[in-house]
Image (cartoon, rainbow, N blue to C red):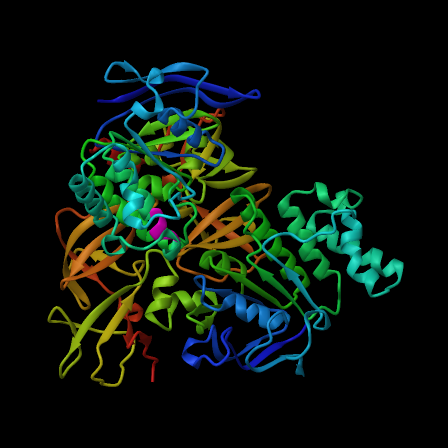
Amino acid sequence: MAQLDIIDVGHTYAPGAEEERWALKPLKLTFESGRTYALVGPSGCGKTTLLNILSGLVRPSRGRVLFDGVDVTALPTKARNIAQVFQFPVIYKSMTVYDNLAFPLQCRRQDKARIDAKVRQVAEALDLHDRLRQPARGLTADDKQLISLGRGLVRDDVAAVLMDEPLTVIDPQLKHSLRRKIREITEQFRPTVIYVTHDQYEAMSFAQELLVMKDGRAVQQGTPEQLFEAPSSTYVGYFIGSPAMNFLTVDRNDGPFTLGGRPLSVAWDIPRRTTEVRVGVRPEYVKVVTDPGPNTFPGRLRGVSDHGAQRVLDIEVAGQPVRAKTPREEGVPVGEEVLVHLPRAKVLPYADGKLVLRS
Amino acid sequence: MNLSATDLCLTVDGVDHLKNVTATFRPGRLHTVIGRTMAGKTTLLRALAGLQKVDSGSLTRAGADFLKTPVWRRDTAMVYQQFINYPHLNVFDNVAFPLKRAGLSRDEIRRRVRQSLASVGLADFEKRKPSQLSGGQQQRVAMARSLARGTGILLLDEPLANLDYKLREQLRDEFKTLFSEQGDTIVVYTTTEPAEAMMLGDVVLVMHEGRILQSGTPQEVFERPATTTVASIINDPPMNIFAGRLAGGQVTVAGFQATHASAHLADLPDGSYRFGLRATDVSLASSGVEGQVTFVEISGSETFVHVVVGKTPFVVQIEGIHDVALGDVVRLRLRPDRLFAFDEQGALMRTPSYDLASVEGR
């Protein structure tokens, strides 16, 4: 398995276009060997372009792609030693499951005993070991996707496994089990995996690290926990988590921040600036309390949405909407007037849509 | 004018698609039908619309035999999972299409189209073609067309299923307001998502293998699931259901001394039961039943940790996003006061006391 570096890589499908309009704005990234990454974002965000640059299907307009330090920018797909899993399963229909898995090794003229051992090891992991002699065409879509993945795993020399929305054609009920299978297998074989999806929760369930993309830019790279706890922008705060992170405009004259005229402490102090400052706080951390206290604000309960084990309360604080997610056992507050506590450590400062880092 | 179904049955190739479906759909109410795929939800909607013949049973509206009413006189509009628009018509004409066919005046058509486009937030999109719209906008156009007709019955078949997560979340909020403005319309809305059924429905009908297993307010169905199957379907992740024994004030699961029995189980005779515990009521703790992590998944703002205890699988829901390693040995704490008890056939015997209190206090 290899480390993949992309250095100042950018791409435009319209040569001559100004950089602002490129499908992928120039960026620098490292995908460490043996880790799983998900590229996630809405359609048109550049995630597929980036994947295609890694696989060699697209030659970037600018920049260099390195596999373990070797420049592969000019190399075609077949010279890059990567395994790919696409939206639709790609299998050799006329071959058995065994031969499908063995094919990449046979092409590389490895000896029979070695091939056999490797195929059986991978088939065991894929749960296909009792169907090795069956023709591959008779398998279900999810098993066919496993074969696509398995063909990558049989090769010891494969640099990376690239997956492009591999669950698209899988029945909803089977998606869960296939995703689980893919994750188990990657934990066992530890390939470098780059996984593209538009579904943020599929990405978070699968990958060790996410790269959130928007408008051709990587807006944040981090573990699922980092994206949830400290979104680097208001967009990530909205995109990750349900309901989305709350953002509130706050005032600051001479002293501390204020919300509706009352002092508000934030997680860390930030330099004084003229631009509008907003604070972000996740609905999970907003608490309806009975007693006044620091960082506690009067609000009006505007609506209650019953989600089952949780309720989402729509509250207006200082004329701004705030959502609180509460466990069902806490019940619904009585009356319209409520007190809302925003725990200081969870109140993050944002300016110009970006998280202001602790200085 | 209620729409009443009685004992609707439909069998195709020996499989029950509808099995003794009896339900009353009332004007001004939103009825969510929740079930897994293939539960019979779409078949039910098609039967109500007159697009699907049934083998037996009756369907009446205002005393009239609705089964004999032809499709075009059923006063029904339907919105499909796969949004359908006329690609060659702009947004205005897409919405106006059925109104023109109904022979309404030009002014009335304009009034209704504008009103329904405004209600779905597309007032400024009249001149666009469907291909120039996002998926969510296209589904809103289909919705506006159905609303503009002002039919007495509105059927929606998993209208959000094909949309991105964030869009689903947004439209769900919008639908809540939108449907509350529909006056006396009977709305029937199918979904596979418990939270959607709960937050949108005035009435929730739980469907499984062609049958309606339970119907009631969201609170009734969620807090008093009639069977283990209902409990599983109405919770996301599905409620943990496991066989256990109650003896001498203790609950044992697969041989493990799991927890003591709370007051709400005190009057149950000793014996074998099936117990239910929501994923939110199991936690990872420093002491408790030992198990191994088999899988971790993230949904919305929650982490679902799958743990197997002996051979019994559990799902633990933790607020927030956390990194839990596969294969780790963990200990589970089962909240005794939150146990649901079902008999061995899966029928509800006892519900947690806080749930009971809140239902009966209404």
Question: Where on the picture, by quarter, is residue B302?
Answer: bottom left
Question: Visible in this render: residue A311?
Answer: no
Image quarter where the N terminus of chain B lies is: top left
Instruction: Give the left or right position of residue B86, taking residue A319 as reference.
Output: right
Magenta-drawn stretch, dominant element (helix, strand or loop): helix
Q: Quadrant of residue A283?
A: bottom left
Q: Position of residue B254 (x, y in %)?
A: 56, 37
| Residue at image location 52% in from the left, 49% down from the top | B306
The residue lying toward the viewer, choosing from B244 and A79, is A79
Asked if residue B108 lies left or right of residue A192, the reply is: left
Q: Position of residue B235 (x, y in %)?
A: 40, 40
Up-down relation of residue A219 to residue B216 (above or below): below
- Which percent across, then down, holds residue A33? 63, 73
Residue B276 position, x and y percent, is 44, 36
Q: Nearer the viewer, residue B172 or A42?
A: A42
Specify whether residue A316 is in view.
Answer: yes
Residue occupying image coordinates x 35% and y 45%: A309
**Residue at 86 percent of width and 64 percent of height:** A110
The image quadrant that residue B75 belongs to is top left
Give the magenta part as a residue range.
Answer: B135-139
The quadrant of the picture occupied by the C terminus of chain B is: top left
Q: Is residue B137 magenta?
A: yes
Q: Is residue A52 placed above or below A154 in the rendered structure?
A: below
Q: Is residue B83 magenta?
A: no
